[in-house]
Every structure is written in C-alpha cells, then in structure tokens.
Image: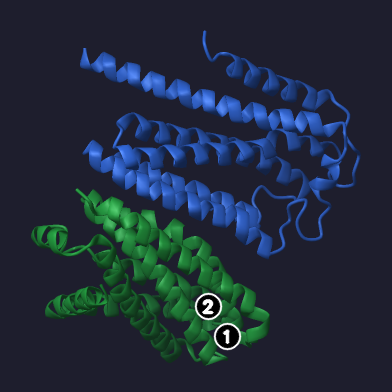
Chain colours: A blue, B green
Amino acid sequence: MKGIWWKLLGLLLVLFSLVYGMLGPVQRLPILNETIRVLYYHVPMWFAMVALMLTSLIYSLKALNTNNFAQDSYAFEAAKTGFFLASIGLSTGMVWARFTWGAFWVNDPKLNGTAVTMLIYLAYFVLRNSVEDPFKRIRLAGVYNIFAFVMMIVFIGILPRLTDSLHPGNGGNPGFNKYDLNSDMRPVFYSAVIGWILIGLWLTNLRVRYKNLKEKHEQV
Amino acid sequence: MIEQIYQIVKLNFRLEWQERQSYFSILIYILSSVYLSYLVFSEVISAETWNAFFWVIFIFSAVQAAYRSFHYEADQRFLLYYGMVKPENLVLGKIIYNFLYLYATGLFTALVFTFLMGNEINSLGAFLFILLLASLGFSAILTFVAGISAKASNNPALPAILSIPLLYPQLISLSRVSLRSLTGFSWEVNAPLLIVLALLSLVSLLLSFLLFPYLWRD
C-alpha cells in the first residue's frame, strides 16, 4: 500500500472538482453565463497534458542515456495518457465553443496548436510502432519525442501570444485571469488541475504495469 | 571540421548529379502540381490563393526532395561514414546541402508560379528573404526526419507523417509574412515575425544538431 496516498489525493481532488464544479457559486457574465463552469473541465486537461508530455520527455531523455526499455515504455505510455487527456480537453472545449462562439471548430491559434500537438504525437505513436528492433526504437522514438515536445511548446506557448485569439484572456476577450481572482472559483480550479495531473500519472502507471504483466504472461 | 562538412556537401552534389533523375523528378513534380492548381484555380487567382498554393506545393516538394537525404548512407556506404565522419559534421553537411537544394526548389517553384499564374510578388527582396528563412528551417527539420525514416525503413508514408506536423509552426508564420510580401511589405512592421521565424529555424537547427548523434550511433 506504499505510495497510495497520492492516488487517493488525486481521486479526491478530481471528485471534488467534478461535483463542486457543478454546484458551487460562479460569476454571472454576459455570453459566458453558466458555461464558465467549463473552466473546471476543460483547462485542467491542458495543464495535465503538458505535465504528462513533460514526464514523457524526461523518460525519453533517461531512456536515451541508459538504453533502458522500461523507461522508453514509460515515456510512450505517458504520451498516450497525455493524448487521451488532450482528447477530453478538446471535446469539452468543442461543446463549450458551440454555445459561445457558435461553432464546434473555429480558426483560432490555440485550436490550431492543439490540433498540431495531437498530430505530432500521433506521428510519434506511428513511428514507435513501426520500428521492430527495441534498441533502435528507444533511439528513434526518443529523439522524435524530444523534437515533438519542443515544437508543442513553441506552438501552444509562443505562437498564440503573437496573434489575437478568441480564447478568454487573449486579445479583446474578457480573460479568465479576472475570474481566477474570484475566490469561489479558485480552489475548485486548482484542485482540478492538481487532481487531473495525479490521475494522469496514475493512469500511466497502471498502463505500464498492465503491459509488463501481459509481456510476462506471454513469455510463460 | 569545416573541411569535412564541405567535402560532404560536395560529395552529395556529385552523387546526386550522377543520378540526375532525382533532380528531374522534383522539377516535374513541381511543374505538374503547379499546373494542377493552375487548371483548378485559373479564374480566381488572388494574392491569397497564390500564397496558399505556393506554400502547400513548396512544403510537399521539399518533403519529396529531402526525404532521400540518407538514401545512400542507409546501406553499404553507411559503415564507411560511421567510421570516418563525426555525426555532427555529417548532419551539418546534409543540412547545408538540403538548404541549397530546397532554396533552388523554392526559387524554381516561384518562377513557375509567376509564369503560369501571373506575378503577384510585390516586394521581391522580402519574398526571397522569407524563402531563404523557410529553406533553412525546413532543411533542418527535414534532414533530421530523413535520418529517422532512413533508420526506421520500409514505411513510405513515414517521412510525410513525421515532418509535416513539425513544420506547421514555421509554415503558419511563413504564410502570414509572405502574404504581406505579396501585397506590400514593410521591414519595420514585420521584423518581429521575421525574428520569430529565424529563431524557429535556429531551434530546429540546434535540435537536429544535438539529437542526430543519438540517432546515428548503432
């Protein structure tokens, strides 16, 4: 039972944010209205995604230096979990966009950034699956993962700042930064961010262990 | 080191020149895709469509041109290279070769565009400079990806899948800034975007340079 505390903590934080996000008080603002609650279900996904991609990067770096299969497979699973969280973030964002901007998909720097990130990581998955030799796989997938992470940071961190975005907080839109100052919303939002990061790490952990067991089973 | 890089660039030109069909196939690739867009879009060519078509065709021909970069090294010549040339020098030499190659490809594409679809370029100097930056960034990323796909082998879709998403950040800034060079360009206004482009190229160059040795050791 060692190391269970952070899993429980993640679970509690996410449950708290899921329930309290619907019930808790929020600000009333024009256009956004109640949809402001999407803050709890959409934004934390991106925080968690970046955290997991960073984990994946760190494990790739480790794997490149030590030629260790376990670390390489951890990097792969972390990237997969990050991708999964990105799909959740994308779908919650799309539902929200339908009711505030009027369309599921608009041409916005942040949406482009997300789409590109997902495409880059899909390419990483394809690359990793198309190499048979495990030693070669560590090197090829590892170096591509590093490249992918840097390009993702450029795309979601730097380029959107150069142009206007429809997203709150950029350009002429009211920013979420203002609402974050609202003391009612802050605790829920932060617990959702931390909770989802922990859940993501747990999910990765479970996937790696499941894979190891499966391999062991096949060998027997 | 510089001597070695120079030798690699020269060797590449000589090897490719012996098999001229790879140059010609790129030329024909460009000609036929530009003509395709000319046929489809002949009535509605504006600066915007000119720009969009130019970059789409350039990116695809660049991928076509560069993905064979490590074609020779993948088999018998590879062992020789491995012993004689440091991977850092090898990748720099290949990037320089691809840079020249892609710049020539871009110039040729622009020429064919001007011939078929009319001259939309307003400030030629700016356009050529943007094309230069584009070739630099593209060659860094495409050379690196060519290295990966040469090692990963036997998946023909791999070069395109791996490289095109990595090129998006540059392409989005490129198409924006090059549209301005078509309609009217001011160096002062566009300086920040050009600096971003130069930095992106630099980052790609640095990453290729640093990561290539990991890729190449066997």
Q: Residue at x 44, y 63 (%)?
A: B204
Give residue B4's position: percent from left, percent from top: 21, 74
**Do the residues indicated by labels 2 and 1 lie within the same chain of the protein?**
yes
Mark 1 residue type:
Leu
* Residue A81 versus residue B1 in the image, above or below: above
Determine which of the numbered discs, if any, sits on residue B182 in the image: 1
* Residue A73 versus residue A213 in the image, above or below: below
Mark 2 or mark 1, earlier in chain: 2
The image quadrant that residue A65 belongs to is top left
Give residue B151's position: percent from left, percent from top: 23, 52
Mark 2 residue type:
Asn
Query: Quick one: SS at disc 2?
Result: helix
Mark 2–mark 1 CB contact (< 8 Å): yes
The span from disc 2 to disc 1 (Cα, nearest Å) is 8 Å
Q: Residue at x 40, y 24 (%)?
A: A208
Taking depth in this image into account, of A189 and B161 the one nearest to the observer is A189
Q: Residue furthest top?
A: A1
Determine which of the numbered discs, if any, sits on residue B51 in the image: 2
Taking depth in this image into account, of A219 and B51 the one nearest to the observer is A219
Quadrant position of the C terminus of chain A in the picture? top left
Query: Quick one: SS at disc 1?
Result: helix
Give residue B184's position: percent from left, percent from top: 63, 88
Q: Residue at x 61, y 41 (%)?
A: A90
Disc 1: host chain: B
Kindly tell me whether residue B60 is visible in this rendering.
no
- Locate residue A204 relative to residue A22 in the image: left or right: left
Kindly tell me whether residue B140 is visible in this rendering.
yes
Q: Residue at x 36, y 85 (%)?
A: B108
Give residue B43's position: percent from left, percent from top: 53, 82
* Residue A208 versus residue A56 in the image, above or below: above
The image quadrant that residue A27 belongs to is top right
